[in-house]
Image (cartoon, helix red, strand yellow):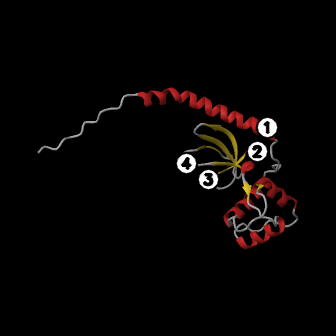
Amino acid sequence: MEYRKLVGVTGLGGLFELINSKADGGIVRSLEDKSTKFVSNRLHSFSHLESIEVYTTGENVNLADVFLAMQSSDKPLPDAGKVDEIKKYYEVVFPTMDFERVYGSDLKKMIKWFDLIKKNNIEIKLSEAGSESVASESVVEKTTASAAKSAPKAAAVKNAPAKKINTPRKMA
């Protein structure tokens, strides 16, 4: 499993490996229980871990940078239920984090996600810029192909004559 395939899904706890994506959603595998399921993008949004940034007092940093700092720290992970302990942990491990803009729930989520990544022995490594552009091009190609398939239908509907609706008239 690769770090670049990991996603967070809104409304679903934990982390998932994106196995395959489709126009209307994606097939994901849970890192916790290894179950596989289809997740519709009508109900959920996907966030690739590679694209998540964290507010700092300077420039924003990628989430992978925070995970690498956590990995290199000898301080044990705090209990995910205690926000005060978590904040103290990050003050030592990643002191430049902007605690006014990073919510306590996000701090908890980062602890849980990091724990899942460690348990699954996933190397925290950002993909190279070259492979990133190839991946984004293939997504654009799929989207364009999908739009091209649906374009004739949309044009037919757009150019169709408007239906006249008969409304009852009041009689005087």
The x, y position of residue 76, in whole percent, is: 83, 66
The label on residue 140 is none
The answer to whether the residues at label 3 and label 4 have Cβ atoms under 8 Å apart is no
The answer to whether the residues at label 4 and label 2 have Cβ atoms under 8 Å apart is no
Q: Which residue is mark 1?
A: 131
Residue occupying image coordinates x 68% and y 67%: 104
Mark 3 to mark 1 CA distance (whole Å) = 26 Å
The answer to whether the residues at label 2 and label 3 have Cβ atoms under 8 Å apart is no
Q: Earlier in the sequence, mark 3 or mark 4?
A: 3
Mark 4 to mark 2 CA distance (whole Å) = 23 Å
Q: Vertical placement of 95 versus 35: above or below?
A: below
Instruction: Spot the residue most to the bottom.
Output: 84
Amino acid type, label 2:
Arg
Residue occupying image coordinates x 57% and y 31%: 147
Q: Earlier in the sequence, mark 1 or mark 2?
A: 2
Q: Quadrant of the C terminus?
A: top left
The label on residue 4 is 2
Q: Which residue is mark 3?
A: 10
Q: Is disc 1 placed on a helix, strand or loop?
A: helix
Amino acid type, label 3:
Thr
Question: Which sits in the foreground, 165 or 40?
Answer: 165
Residue occupying image coordinates x 83% and y 61%: 70
Q: Is disc 4 placed on a helix, strand or loop?
A: loop
Question: Which sits in the foreground, 136 or 92?
Answer: 136
Task: Estimate how packed mark 3 is, as few (under 14), some (14 to 19) or many (20 or more) residues with alpha carbons within 10 Å.
Answer: few
